[in-house]
Image: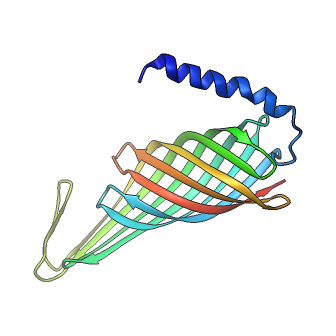
Amino acid sequence: MNSKYILSFLFLIIAAMPLQAQKKSSYIHPQQVKSGIGITFTGTGDMMGTSLFTEYHYFLNNYASLSSALSFKFFKDDSDGLLINEHMKDVELGAYLHPLHGDDFSFFFGGGVMLREFYFSVATDPVTNYQFDDTYVPTASSYSTTQYGIGYSVCAGFSFKLKQDIDFTFQEKLQNDTNGNITWDSQIGVIFSF
């Protein structure tokens, strides 16, 4: 795709922002807290799991916010003679753009940097062994490790008003860290504005 088209598209979005600002919206507040749950997939072990998240957004203006977030992810696989558990804790600082918003609907996207704690454990049965990275786990034994890394996240989603100062949100988030632990989250939640 030609970069000229991308720059033209971004220019149109930015140029349209003042037009929307003329309509005084009660939708955007200076602060928001977003909390929810989700389904998450990790490329580290190709497992599905659950995620819990909480985000705080401070709006610089009607179209940009700074955020901090805390999330927990849980994965478990009990098959083929193995019991594998993975847990991730993420702390994130980010920035978001909210180019389309109104009284009832908002679209947002953004990203940030994160710190991640990744815990991995595996237990084998009497006939199965396992290899993880360069680590060999013999039969009838267990192994666990904790890794720390920094990384990035990219997120996009939308929200719509349920009632005054309370919105429902859906978002997709991709995260990756320096240890190669990639996650993809589909999350739903509630936004409290104040």
* Residue located at (13% from left, 83% from top): 126
User: Considering depth in this image, is 66 or 22 the residue closer to the camera?
Assistant: 22
Decide: is 111 above or below 146. above
Picture coordinates of residue 145, whole percent (x, y): 32, 61
Residue at the spot 72% in from the left edge and 56% down from the top edge = 160
Question: In the rendering, at what x and y percent does residue 124 appear?
Answer: 20, 77
In the rendered structure, the answer to whether residue 65 lies left or right of residue 155 reads: right
Residue 193 spot, x, y in % from top left: 80, 54
| Residue at figure coordinates x 64%, y 51% from the top left | 158
Of 185 and 124, the residue lying toward us: 185
Q: Nearer the viewer, residue 140 or 23?
A: 23
In what quadrant of the picture does the N terminus appear?
top left
Query: In the drawing, does residue 23 fall left or right of residue 43?
Result: right
Q: Is residue 137 above or below residue 55?
A: below
Quarter of the image where one finds residue 84? bottom left
Residue 40 picture location, percent across and down: 45, 62
Q: Of residues 54 and 61, which is closer to you in this image?
A: 61
Q: How is the image coloured?
A: rainbow
Q: Hey, which residue is sitting farthest left in the picture? A: 127
Numbered-mark total: 0
Q: Residue furthest bottom?
A: 126
Q: Residue most toward the top? A: 4
